[in-house]
Amino acid sequence: MRLVFLFLLLAPALAQALVEVTAVAATASVLDTSVRFPSGTFRVGQGREAILARLPDAGRFNLEVYAAKGLAARLQPGFVQQVLTSFAAAGYFVGGQQEAQVAEERRTRYDLRDGAGRAAVLLVVRRGDELVFAFGKER
């Protein structure tokens, strides 16, 4: 009886972990096969236009929007550093950084370049415990 009760308590956590692993793998394969996002990252479909509106030159890039949930979002500086490290490992290096505080949001834009000199952008939007980021290569 105790074992069944323990299983019922752990089932949602196991299901969430499976969804996160699947979401991260799917996200990485869409963006760039060599970029790996931390656990807790998922692709945003609905509502992505609101994030892209924060990037004035969004039309210049093929952008995808991602969000972090749970522990990943609460550890924002470490999460962002892990994302930037993953981009560096994939050949995207930071060329410039701009930060702005708008109302309750802190927005950080990282201008990146790959080994061939092609531009890419990473926009990180932090608000409270929420963390959303958009990444895209130049068209």
Image (spheres, rainbow, N blue to C red):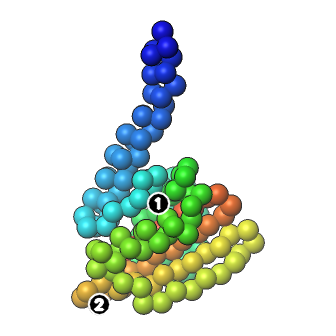
Q: Is residue 90 left or right of residue 81?
A: left
| Residue 71 in view of the camera | yes
* Disc assigned to residue 43: none
Q: Position of residue 92 (x, y in %)?
A: 33, 80
Q: Is residue 65 above or below residue 101?
A: above
Numbered label tally: 2
Tell me the kind of residue under disc 1.
Tyr
Quarter of the image with the C terminus in it: bottom left
Q: Is residue 94 above or below residue 9?
A: below
Name the residue at 34% across, 46% down.
Answer: 22
Q: Position of residue 122 (x, y in %)?
A: 46, 75
Name the residue at 55% across, 52% down.
Answer: 71
**Residue 77 position by quadrant:** bottom right
Could you tell which of marks 2 and 1 lies nearer the N-terminus? 1
Q: Position of residue 81 (x, y in %)?
A: 47, 72
Tell me the kind of residue under disc 2.
Gly
* Disc assigned to residue 117: 2
* Disc assigned to residue 66: 1
**Callout 2 environment at 10 Å: few (<14), some (14 to 19), or many (20+)?**
few
Residue sitting nearer the eye, 78 or 112: 78
Residue sitting nearer the eye, 117 or 71: 71
- Dot 2: element: loop
- Dot 1: element: strand
